[in-house]
Image (spheres, rainbow, N blue to C red):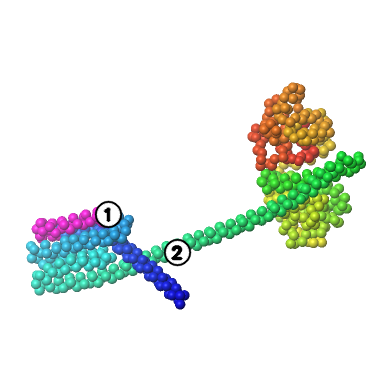
Amino acid sequence: MDSQIQRSNFGALIRSAYWAKRLAERGRLAVESARESARLRLRQIMSMRPVVLILATIIVATFSIMAPWWQVCAWMVPLAIVWFFAPVACKKLLTRIEQGNEHEIVLAQRSLLILAICNALIVGSGVWWLGLGLPDEKILFLVTLLQSMYAVTALVNASSHFPTSAVSTSINLMSAATYWFHTGWNGAPIGFALVGLLVLLLRLSRQIKQAFDAAVSARYENQCLQAELAVEKQHAASAKRLEQEKQNAEAALRQAEQANLMKTRFLAAASHDLRQPLHALVLFSGLLDTASAEQRQIFVQHIRHSADSLNRLFGGLLDLSRLDAGAVQANWVATRVKPLVENIVSEYQPKAAAKQLALLLDVDDAVAVTDPFLIERVLRNLVDNAIKYTAAGSVTVSAKRKDHEVRVAITDTGIGIREQDQPFVFDEFYQLHNPSRDSEKGAGLGLSIVRRLCDLLDHRLILDSKPGLGTTIAVSMPMGRLAQPTISDAPTMAESTESLRGMAVVVIEDDSRGRIAMKSLLDAWGCIPLVYESAAEAVSALQAEEMSPDVLITDFRLADGLNGFDAIISLRQLFTDLPASIITGESEANWTPTSALPEVPVFQKPVSADVLANWLASVR
């Protein structure tokens, strides 16, 4: 019972809301119809001034010949005054109804009704006023005809508001009809004709009013429909935008969750892979004090091996960090592919031979548009990875021209990669056949670096592998033309160090172990190492000993608050054009070269001995 009462109350509430809406719409329609009617009549009155002036001139010129001036002026002057000043008042009323509310519209309708009554009284009195001294019925008929014409023209203006039209037309025509009935039976036909004309005009006025209301209603409904359609479109656009924003937010959330998951996995794998060689290094270092000479040599080999593993892992992590930070910039040039690939294959021949693998070469003499240093890193990683995971058979490195591209492919006869694993082989620390994370099998960073470098170079990376048949990884580069001579190969390590004997090298390093290592390395090369902790110490010592160094190597972040660029500037004040370089452990995003030293090379730690030797030989 209660549910029925609730449904009944709900239905009544819906019906009342519906009829309230309909009444409100009807009320707004009535207001808009009245506003449009007043607007139409006011604008027509404002535009009638020239017509009234011409008509008044014709009437005065016509009747002044047949009637005394005072009679003509007595009729025309009030009419001219009303119609002359009416547009001024209408302009003010138009402003009020455009800007005002329903009350202003009612006042405008009332003012227009009063104006129409006054005008009808003046026009309708014409036949009486002129007929007082004019026995000529032809003249009076002409006046009556003018009144009828005026009534017809006024119908067009006033029909949008039926009361105004009915009152003004009735006053105008009935005053003339009354006059003609007053003259006797001779004027009765004209009087009846005027009454008939009045009935016809009133009927037409009502029809025009109905048509006007229908037009206003249709336009209002059209405007309402357009407004509703615009609102619906706006709502649809808002809903679509909100849905798009929701999808974007969900996608961003999924991406953030995936990135967080990848970061967690990355940190876990990196932590494990760092701890493994570090743990071995700590254990072997602790055994050195109590070990025999023979055991020490074995332990030192293990320590070196662990240090190499750490160095490779740190190098890979730093490379990934620099690539992700956008610190690596590519320099695309026309590069001969054949000598580049031949050098890599020659370098890896001993490693392949140690596993009894055939390292084959099939290379066209092609030119590709790429960064020679970055693409060399890509190909080295791919060749190293292929040899590492191929137990028997061969590794083939090929470079072929195809459709305006140069495709370098590394094909092995290894165990292959399953299709479901292929999307993940370029992720960090992803190793298919190393679940125990054995450092002997690498850290799992090589292919992830390859993918990032290929993305940076805008080179296509293609993977084709079948389990049991082997794997092919190809890099596709745009073909180019050699625009400049190729650069000769860098000197060998032996050639570089041989030319360094007697070279005075200033080293500024605030880390004591770093100073010892650099001094030992330079001594081994036959250089004269001048090692200092700060730039101020170096300047003081060199001035006191009156020595002239050949080259400067400085760390970037120094203990005295200065950086490597400051140290170079300080020493060049004493030794003009002193060759210098900076070695830093900072990422490239954390240091900015000074514009005064654009030629100073910056090496990222760890720096290999051959890189330092080659650079020192180049500035000797």
* 469 left or right, relative to 170: right
Is residue 181 part of the magenta span, yes or no?
A: no
Label 1, label 2: how many angstroms apart (C-alpha)?
A: 35 Å
- Quadrant assignment, res 557: top right
Task: Please say if 68 is above or below 585.
Answer: below
Check disc 2 and report the residue beneath it. 229
| Percent of width and height locating residue 93 | 27, 56
Q: Quadrant of the N terminus?
A: bottom left
Q: Quadrant of the C terminus?
A: top right
The kind of secondary structure element at disc 1 is helix
Q: Which mark is residue 92?
A: 1
- Quadrant assignment, res 37: bottom left
- Amino acid type at image mark 2: Leu
| Percent of width and height locating residue 86 | 23, 56
Task: Please say if 207 is above or below 104.
Answer: below
Crowd around label 1: few <14 · some 14–19 · many ≥20 (10 Å): few
